[in-house]
Image: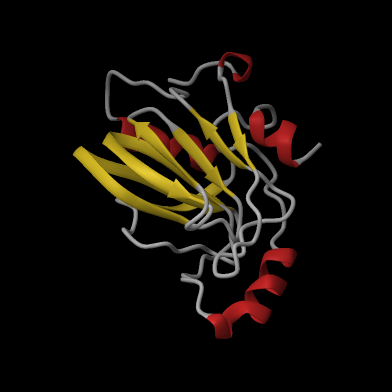
Amino acid sequence: MSQKPQDVEVQTHLFEDDGAIPNNPTLPLLIYPGALSSSGDLTSEMKELFAQNGWGGSWVDGVFPYHHYHSTAHEVLGVAGGGARLTFGGESGITVEVEAGDVVVIPAGVGHRNVGSSGGFRVVGAYPRGQTWDLRTGEPGERPEVLENIRKVPLPDADPVFGKEGPLVEHWLK
């Protein structure tokens, strides 16, 4: 189902605080293009794989069409169907095309939104064991609390796709 870690050409993006979306000052967004494939039920396989690697609380849905972020949890999104254009990092961030089999690991604080999708777009989302997500949209009054929350979010124990190896271990846990 998954490639070997060395076969995935991970893309990394580190975003600065844009005044509304805090982003994450130390952990880069990780994009694993084509990391997963399946001839069966990719949704179920992603849920199982993420859980095996310590990422739980999984759900299946789309991505909100407005900038939002989580200050209390990191998040993995596995694209289980269709495709979309997702913006990461807030208004001045980047927009990327994702399709079935792609995986994105979003550090706490990094903004994300769906700017257009097609073909039955759906993702499997999950969070490192013990982390509970919140939903933040960049309101001015939330700044002091969310900056402290982001600073306190623990690093995950493993990469959601490759376990004790993989891009997350290389880029976050080094």
Q: Could you tell me which residue is drawn at 74 percent across and 65 percent down?
A: 151
Q: Residue furthest right?
A: 174
Residue 172 vs residue 156, the one in the foreground: 172
Q: Is residue 153 above or below residue 5?
A: below
Q: Along the line of sight, which residue is nearer the eye, 88 or 44?
A: 88
Report which quarter residue 166 is drawn in: top right
Residue 34 percent location from the top left of the image: 43, 22
At a point 74% along the width and 51% down the height, the residue shown is: 26
Q: Position of residue 109 (x, y in %)?
A: 59, 61
Its colouring scheme is: secondary structure
Give the vertical position of 79 relative to 19 (above or below): above
**Which residue is pictured at 72% across the width and 57% down the height?**
154
Tell me: 23 left or right of 101.
right
Q: Quadrant of the N terminus?
A: top left
Q: Where in the figure is residue 113, as x and y percent of width and height?
A: 39, 54
Residue 60 visible in rendering: no
Q: How many marks?
A: 0
Q: Quadrant of residue 140?
A: bottom right
Identify the residue at the far bottom of this view. Answer: 141
Left or right side of 96 for 6: right
**Residue at the image position 72 percent from the left and 73 percent from the top:** 148
Task: Give the x, y percent position of residue 87.
Answer: 43, 48
Task: Assign the C terminus to one quadrant of the image.
Answer: top right
- Reply above or below: 162 against 62: above
Q: Which quadrant would residue 20 be assigned to in this image?
A: bottom right
Q: For this view, does 77 lie left or right of residue 29?
A: left
